Amino acid sequence: MKSDQLILNNPQSSPADLAKSKKKKMNAKMMAYYLMVIPAALLFFAFHTFPAIQGIYYSFTNWNGINLDYDFVGFKNYINLFKDTAVRDSYLFTFKFAIFAGVLVNIISLAVAIGLNAKIKGRNFFRAVYFLPNILSVLIVGFIFNFVFTSIIPNLGEKYQIEFLTENILGNANLAWIGILIVFIWQSCAFNVILYLSGLQTVPTELYEASGLDGANRWQQFWKITFPVIAPFFTINMVLAMKNALMVFDQIVAMTGGGPGTVTTSISYLIYTGGLAGGEFAFQSANGVIYFIVIVAISVFQLKVLQKREMDM
Amino acid sequence: MKKTVSLLAASVLSISLLAGCGSGENAGGADNGKVKIEFFHYKREAMDTFDKLIEKFEKENPNIDIEQASPPDAGTVIKTRVSKGDLPDIISIGGDMGYNELSKAGVFTDLSKDKVLEKVQPAYIQMLKDITGQEKIYAVPFAANAVGVIYNKAIFNELGLEVPKTWDEFVALSETIQKAGKIPFYHTYKDAWTLLPSFNALAANTQGADFYEQLNKGEVLAGKRYKEAVEKMVVLSKYGHKNQQGVAYNDGNTAFANGESAMYLQGIWAIPEIKKANPDIELGVFPFPATNNPDEIKVISGVDLLYGLSAKSEHPKEAKKFIEFMLQDENAKQYIEEQNAFSALKGIAQDNPTVADLNVMMENGSVTDFPDHYIPTGVYPDKTLQTLVQDKDVDAALEKIQKDWEKVQSRK
């Protein structure tokens, strides 16, 4: 057989031969693409999808995580989930946390991004500084803030006679969640700032100049020009911030252990402690399935609402 | 040329991936003819002591390599390893619910007929049977702990205080200390589990003698029988300090070591930690005066450390050798001296003057196991107590414990 290259380059090749060689060339290319993707897909399936499916499987059993045998119990775990007060409280806490965190993270990161977009001195330096929290380990940051809240702030409160600072906020059943919120926002903003920054840079500067000539002030410029143009970035930031806030875990491990009592026990924390230490493996697997559905539902809802808004803009 | 270079680079990178896998494999098996044993335990405070003993063992047995593993939250870690099927050769935890669950899961080798058990005091062997409800023994009890009240002898001398023998004397003593401007107890309520030692001491002595009997019949009496213990927890919470909700175990150990409070409600396992922070402190431990009948008060003592042999160990003989080594008199004595524990073995006394006040009770056998070893996991009494000492609502706490216990019971 003549080589495909020769056939393709030869202006006198028959149409049938040309077609065959082109297909072969296309197939060779496709093979390369498949070879690049398949290993990654296999790993993803093995370490992500397969365990998830296993989890769904276990949620229909009564396995406690270490026994050698278990029975199938059908939907019993799911029914018990809806009756369980600990589960209900964890969902309520997580939703409350997610709403506050989602909104505050976006407001603060947008504000910071606008600041970092302006022509300030040392702009690159500040951008690096504001991005730093993102590369730190979430758990370590939690432990350090735990120390700050437990020892450093009460000492400052005592020294400068500021009453409300003298107690560890993390030990207060009503305010512990605020401690977690502060640390979460501090670290999450970094990533959202980057997204907003890239969004802000897509706004054509001529629009600002033109509107400035027409007499628009900063506030009007923001609402009528900036905000509508960065609408897609706003969408993605809201969805990501909400999702991360719903999955809050590391800070709770490092700072409050779900306490005092169970007031800062988030859904993921309950699944972890109940499922592994608490011996409720199958029950918490069912909780995990519901958790997944909830997060997907909320994210899809957000996308639909916000993308419609983008269209309207 | 470029193609060759990039091909070489790609293959080097992929081979380095495999190198990571390779070294991981060797860790479990034999290495240069040496047998590697993994010794997994939950006593992070004892890692130094174990290092010394392991060194001694390895000198006597040059072909055995013992690797110590003590991660934080070891109780949870061992459970995850069990579900993965990755078992260490020797598993050392306490005689608690975890031991019960692991025994039922078939993790341990049955040691009931093993002659190592002959060295152990019968009271502690009985405890293991009580916890699992079975006649078979799956581990060797090694060290026992005790819960009393740790006190700072210097502060007691300064204020001219005497060790209290009854509950009323205990409360009066705390009043005196508080009026003198000092902190009676350095509570560490941020760590929920630190509420358990005092709760255990109170509940064991006030819950009624037939509590466990009724429990075995399926009757959960916690809501009623824990009332006195819960009320006394509220009383104790009044004699703490301003930031007691916000400080944790480690903060408490350091603060008490630095003389910030007169007493510390912890088990004797905390003593090595306190001494680390302040080696010069003079400590004593007196039995927890849970009631006004000092003759009936029992000291809470449980199996603090046991040695379990994994049923799936590849080197059971060598692992057994290490366990037998640890059970030798001089090694057992070294452990209890350095860790301020009591020995579960026959004939090994704890001479440390710090715990001398407890010795009488331990020798009499006036001991009883931790009530929370019988509370099923999933009830979380420590978290309920954490809420209790903040809002002081006795009825709510009792109701919650009762409900949670029934809920877990019904799930089985």
Image (cartoon, rainbow, N blue to C red):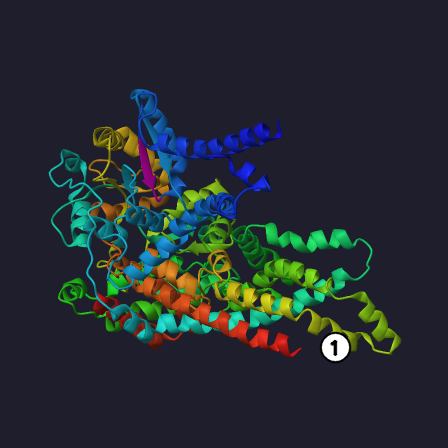
Q: Which residue is mark 1?
A: A224
Q: Residues within 10 Å of mark 1 (few under 14, many from 20)?
A: few
Give the vertical position of A42 relative to A88 (above or below).
above
Q: Name the element at disc 1.
A: helix
Residue B235 appears anywhere in the view = no
The chain carrying label 1 is A
Closer to the camera in the image, B208 or B71: B71
Q: Is residue B40 magenta?
A: yes
Residue at the spot 31% in from the left edge and 75% down from the top edge: A83
Closer to the camera in the image, A253 or B189: A253
Asked which quadrant contains residue A263, the reply is: bottom left
Q: Is residue A110 magenta?
A: no
Q: Main secondary structure of the magenta part?
A: strand
Residue A248 image position (x, y, % from top left): 49, 62
Q: For the C terminus of chain B, give its image quadrant.
A: bottom left
Residue A172 image position (x, y, % from top left): 51, 68
Residue A254 image position (x, y, % from top left): 49, 55
Closer to the camera in the image, A222 or B391: A222
In the image: residue A268, left or right of residue A54:
right
- Boundaries of the magenta span: B37-42
Give the vertical position of B365 relative to B374 (above or below).
above
